[in-house]
Amino acid sequence: MTGKTQGLSRQFLLTLRRCLTVYGVVLAVGLLLFVPLCYQSVMLGYTGSSAIVFPGINDVELYFRPILLFTAMAWQWFFFDSALCHGVSRKSYMKATAISAAVVPLLLSVLYLMARFVVIATGTAICYEKSDGCRITGPFYAHLSEQFMYAWERMDWNRAPSMWEAQYSPALPAGPLFVGLKFFSLMLSYTAIGALIGAVLAWLARRGIWAVSIGVVVLWYAAQQLSSSPSMLIYMPKMQVISNFYELGTAQNRLVQAMSGRVVSYTADGVEIGTYVVWIPLAESLVLFVLCMWIIWMFTKRREIHPARQRG
Amino acid sequence: MSASEYATAAADAVAAVKLTITDLHKRYGSTVALNGVNLTLRPAIYGLFGRNGAGKSTLMGIIANRLLPGGGSIELDGASVFENETAQSRIYLLNETVPFMVGVRLNTIFKREERYYGDFDWAFSARMLAKFGIMPGSLYGQLSLGQRMIVRLVAALCVPVDVLLLDEPVLGLDAANRELFYKFLLESFSEHPRIIVLSTHIISEIAHVVERVAILDQGRIIDEFGAESVGSRATVLVGESDRVNMVIASNQLQIIAREQMGHLVSVVVRGQVDTSELPSDVSANRLGLQEYVIRATSATDIQKGQ
């Protein structure tokens, strides 16, 4: 029943270009707004606080998370009708979605790495210890990714929390590559999840405004929950305040390790050694990406455009 | 290849365009929208008529791949149109859905159509906009409802497609602009013969525009004929009930619709009736296109009401 289109069709190429343009415009605006923030952080400087979130320093991962989520969501939700009305097939739209959702994080990762390591190379970075890991500070940084500069760290958990002392290894020769891969895995997850949310909302939209409203509330609640408890473990892997998540051998502990890519082992004298294995989050994000794209395709191939009366 | 040979080849290619709809089905939940539609379209201006909810928009939406069929097939020159971008690049549907942002200029809209469908007829579009009194640099969102429809009609007539589907194309247009549109439609067709399907409820106005007519009722094509033959499609007999029934029985006429009005009855029968053989108290009149469509699609209701 389905007709085949050979090669790269004009409709596909136009859709891909349009999708990349949408991402490009949003990211360009995002970067334009990010530059003044970086300038501000340079002017403010580092405060010396040992707080997890340093005043005046911009977390790139956190900054780009909503941008990528909402752009991917908007593309999936709002641009489908226009594409299909111009003869674009559902398959081409899906292909353009998937390619853009992979290429944009890749380009963003390369851009981030280049900018970040230029900042480091030009000597504006200061490596300091005993705060939240050996973070390379500067006008911006990537909180989760830059942990992957280091192979492992040692932490004596037998001491009281106030006396925790960490011993950090020096940066790995391939550290920048690992940082880039971890950053890419995060960005890839954001675009995949954003596109999935967009597809779900578009599906709900066909069922009326109430379905969309309920969907938005549910998503908002889920996002709140995820950004409060479990994801705190990802952001602060050394904050062992929720015992089960950090208890060696428990399923929760393994989950934390799997989510963060920080594989923990303990020496006989109770010293925790955290090894950052970048392949774990990378593989997870790729699986997540494939899973999200498959679900989106299940929605997309059933998607229809019903005449919207009186839209003018 | 000489110019005349090229023109002949182009005409042959156009003549070869064939859109074949076979046993097409579509349901919306428990509602049957299309129930086995069979239709073959060749280059001509078609009028697709039917009552509200007959399935006209659904049929057009499926041809343009915007809706998914429940079953059946649609082939353009032997290739399925479903999810087929090569086929869809030759099909253009204009309906209520606005496929672009409203805050753009008209030229931007036309350029976009050109990117997707190829050579846009800029000269024709400029001439049409001038006749309709719309500035090419206007913002789409600042136009009136009727003008917005005109812009979309201009875009539809200027894209080089082989199948043009126009669902309620004169919605919001005043009488003068409707006449102007019909004129441009005929001009466009004479320049580029192709399959054009018009779906509208203002049947009397486009009776002189359409070449062929397809009537859709309750999800089925109930009749398809050349527009010029509408007079021979049906005859309405009016008279005393007994007398009319006698005529119908004696001539073995097939009843399309029947309406009782006191002692009188009005019966629409298929085909022509020789008036010389009718009793003096029974009158026979040929039906115009609009009357025929109304009678043909009201038949079920009228008969149910008996």
Image (cartoon, rainbow, N blue to C red):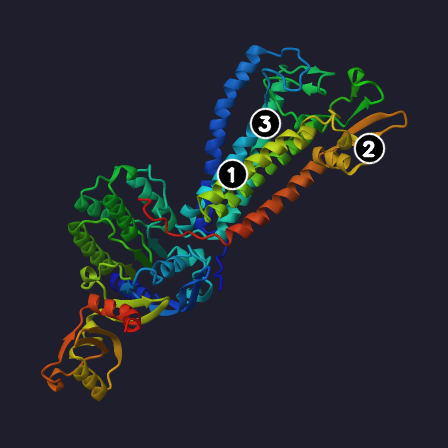
Left or right, residue B117 beside residue B240: right
Q: Residue furthest left?
A: B280
Pointer 1 residue: A216
Q: Residue A291: where, in percent of width, then height? A: 62, 46
Q: Amino acid at mark 1?
A: Val
Pointer 2 residue: A248
Q: Residue B1: where, in percent of width, then height? A: 30, 62
Of pointers 1 and 2, the one earlier in the residue sequence? 1
Asked whether the residues under the numbered discs 1 and 2 touch, taking CB atoms below 8 Å apart as contact, a structural biologist would say: no
Dot 1: element: helix
Dot 3: element: helix
Pointer 3 residue: A62
Vertical order, B134 against A130 (above or below): below
Q: Residue A302: where, in percent of width, then height? A: 50, 54
Vertical order, A215 against A131 (above or below): below
Q: Residue A140: where, in percent of width, then height? A: 59, 20
Q: Residues within 10 Å of mark 2 (few under 14, many from 20)?
A: some
- Whether residue B229 is visible to the viewer of this picture, yes or no, is no
User: Which label sits on residue B39?
Assistant: none
Which quadrant of the structure image shows residue B191? bottom left
Front tag of 2 and 3: 2
- Whether residue A118 is visible to the viewer of this picture, yes or no, is yes
Left or right, residue B176 beside residue B194: left
Q: Quadrant of the C terminus of chain A?
A: top left
- As measured in the structure, the alpha-carbon distance from the residue carrying label 3 to the one carrying label 1 is 21 Å
Q: Residue furthest right?
A: A268
